[in-house]
Amino acid sequence: MPSRTAFTLLAQLLGGAYIAPLYFFIHYVESDVQRYATVETRKVEKLNLRTILLTIGIAYLLPRVLMFHVPGLENRQWINGVFFQPFPLYALLIQNILQRFHASEADEEKGGKEKDGDLFGLILSYIIFGSVASGAYISHWVTKPTQIPQIFFSNLSNPSAEHTMLYGAAKVLRYDQICMFSAGIVWILLHYWDLKKAGFITASWLRIVGWFAGVTLLCGPGASMALMWSWRESVIRIDLPSEQLESAAHVDD
């Protein structure tokens, strides 16, 4: 948790274009498929699952929504500076507080041996996050269909063209988003490369890339990342027997 908070805070301060590729690289190196050879290493703490949705809702989504709907530029700038920019710190604090309320329940379940008992909460989180991202993406296309093409494609062939301050901010957003999502594409496909190399997934690259590209175009990058990661999760947690992962880990050793 502290390391993720540090990365997110650095992304807020320096820009995701600089931090996201570094985070994806470190995560990929530390998340080799052989690491999930046992049921225990594949589990996600239920305490985190029970608090993550409310934490992100309060610390990230709420100030994000207020920035677009509160009247007055000064009020929006105040919300951005006080609440949105340092939201990783608020998220850490809020989740720690929420986890204290669920700590007793978690202690009671520690002795449980239910296999993949946390999977429902994990998939539900992917569905909710993907739906929120998709809803924002689609509503933006419906209400302002020309804005996204203007932000990402205007003066693309002439980066030195004169522009207003507002366009300059949009230009920064353009390259920030392009760098982050490009790094995310490489990150996702590397994980699928590992799955295919180990023989854990039989889907063709045409199908994998097709789903990734299709959902990105129709529902946005946030939804496509959620879909692809939940697909990987289902391969490791549902489709793949523990014995196969364990035997692969022994061979790798």
Image (cartoon, rainbow, N blue to C red):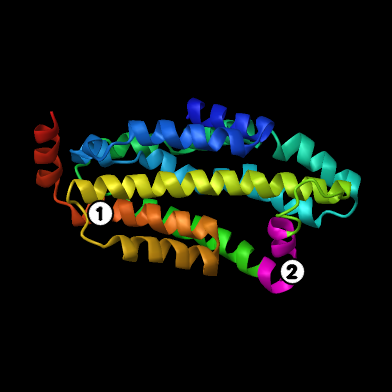
Kind of residue at disc 2: Thr
Residue at label 1?
Answer: 235
Q: Secondary structure at mark 2?
A: loop
Q: Magenta part of the protein: which range?
A: 140-153
What residue is rendered at 33% in x and 64% in y? 206
Where does the C terminus fall, quadrant-wise? top left
Q: Is residue 221 visible?
A: yes
**Secondary structure of the magenta portion, mostly?**
helix
What x and y, as percent, mark residue 225?
46, 54
Callout in the foreground (1, 2): 2
- For image coordinates 34% across by 31% down, the residue present is 30
Position of 83 compared to 218: left or right?
Answer: right
Residue 17 is tagged as none
x, y percent for residue 209: 38, 61
Q: Which residue is mark 2?
A: 146
Q: In the depicted view, which residue is nearer to us: 139 or 192?
A: 192
